[in-house]
């Protein structure tokens, strides 16, 4: 009996220790789901070449809607639709590549700070695979980017990136992240246009071609010595300038839009001063180029015609065509902007 009574305190201590361990295990089990989800997101991110995690309806439920707030992580989601990739005015493929650049840059710049990597994850959703999730977010137009923060309970309450900021591509996405999360994305790292192998091949080809090119230059037999090439280049530069092509390249303007009222129709001229489509720029540039070529013809070629009547007939026809072209430009400008252009005659003519 003495031995049994002596073991009782040990048994009580052991039981108390087991109770403490059970309580600790229960506490860990309660906290584990969020940590498990974060670890799973890190695993999915590491398996993605671009660092962007592909989500579907099940994943949205697991990582967002079925979790308790606050979560230990935020999700930046790019909403995509493969069937709309051929719509050039949406720029979805380009924006998706820029989104991947931001994800890769964030991962590279925060490599020394693992806690930052586990606080923000870049994801994408495809419409055909995740129509239910699109409805939960309330997304009805693309392009679209949402930030789901740790405190967000309803997906519709997540923060949307302003569509007007998409023109600056990756840089505007990085600014959106930094302003909303406080995390630093860092400089955007873009891949080089050419690989080292390609550059090496080009250098070798240039070195081989250089002696032959020098021989042609010294003999005056290159395209740069051909007057026709300079003439065509001058006309091209003139058309390039007056057609607003540089504006279209910088702003990435589409050539045309799809009519919202009738998707089977295309809109080539947009009424409103805030936007210019590529097609209307080319149309006006073509009219300006006609006038320029006719004026050049009258001042450089027509003067060589000896017959005065022929000169007058061609000049009169050319002036009529120039008048028509300028009138069309003035009409389009008035239709687009609402501003009128009026002639001002000398007071003595009134």
Image: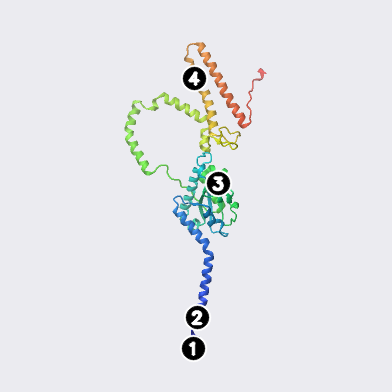
Label 3: few (<14), some (14–19) or many (≥20) C-alpha neighbours in 10 Å:
some
The local secondary structure at tag 2 comes to helix
Q: Which residue is drawn at 51% across and 77% down?
A: 15
Q: Compared with residue 211, is residue 76 higher up or lower down, i.e. above or below?
A: below
Q: In this view, does 239 lie to the left or right of 206?
A: right
The local secondary structure at tag 1 comes to helix
Instruction: Give whichever of discs 2 and 3 has the lower sequence position.
Output: 2
The local secondary structure at tag 4 comes to helix
Q: Is residue 113 visible?
A: no
Q: Which residue is drawn at 58% across and 25% down?
A: 328
- C-alpha gap between disc 3 and disc 4: 52 Å
Could you say where residue 118 lies in the image, as x and y percent from the top left? Answer: 50, 57
Instruction: Give whichever of discs 4 and 1 has the lower sequence position.
Output: 1
The local secondary structure at tag 3 comes to strand
Instruction: Give whichever of discs 3 and 4 has the lower sequence position.
Output: 3
Which residue in the protein does label 3 denote?
A: 144
- C-alpha gap between disc 3 and disc 1: 77 Å
Q: Is residue 4 visible?
A: yes
The label shown at residue 11 is 2
Choose mark 3 or mark 4, whichever is in front: 3
Which residue in the protein does label 1 denote?
A: 2
Instruction: Give yes or no for contact between labels 4 and 2 (Cβ–Cβ under 8 Å).
Output: no
């Amino acid at each position: 009996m003495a031995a049994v009574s002596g073991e009782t305190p040990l048994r009580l201590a052991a039981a108390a220790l087991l109770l403490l361990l059970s309580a600790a295990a229960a506490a860990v089990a309660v906290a584990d789901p969020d940590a498990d989800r974060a670890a799973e997101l890190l695993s999915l991110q590491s398996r993605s070449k671009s660092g962007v995690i592909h989500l579907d309806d099940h994943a949205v439920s697991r990582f967002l809607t079925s979790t308790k707030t606050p979560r230990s992580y935020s999700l930046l989601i790019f909403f995509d639709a493969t069937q709309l990739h051929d719509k050039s005015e949406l720029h979805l493929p380009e924006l998706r590549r820029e989104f991947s650049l931001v994800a890769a840059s964030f991962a590279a710049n925060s490599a020394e700070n693992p806690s930052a990597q586990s606080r923000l994850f870049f994801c994408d959703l495809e419409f055909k695979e995740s129509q239910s999730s699109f409805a939960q977010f309330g997304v009805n137009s693309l392009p679209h980017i949402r930030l789901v923060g740790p405190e967000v309970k309803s997906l519709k309450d997540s923060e949307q990136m302003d569509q007007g900021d998409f023109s600056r591509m990756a840089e505007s996405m990085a600014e959106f992240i930094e302003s909303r999360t406080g995390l630093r994305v860092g400089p955007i790292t873009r891949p080089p246009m050419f690989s080292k192998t390609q550059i090496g091949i080009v250098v070798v080809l240039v070195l081989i071609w250089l002696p032959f090119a020098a021989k042609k230059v010294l003999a005056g037999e290159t395209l740069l010595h051909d007057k026709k090439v300079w003439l065509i280049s001058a006309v091209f530069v003139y058309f390039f300038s007056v057609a607003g092509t540089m504006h279209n390249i910088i702003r990435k303007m589409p050539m045309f839009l799809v009519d919202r009222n009738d998707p089977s129709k295309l809109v080539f001229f947009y009424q409103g001063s805030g936007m210019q489509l590529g097609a209307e720029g080319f149309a006006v540039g073509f009219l300006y180029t006609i006038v320029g070529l006719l004026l050049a013809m009258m001042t450089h070629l027509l003067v060589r015609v000896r017959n005065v009547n022929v000169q007058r007939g061609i000049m009169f026809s050319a002036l009529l065509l120039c008048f028509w072209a300028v009138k069309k430009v003035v009409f389009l400008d008035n239709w687009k902007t609402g501003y009128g252009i009026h002639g001002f005659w000398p007071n003595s003519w009134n």
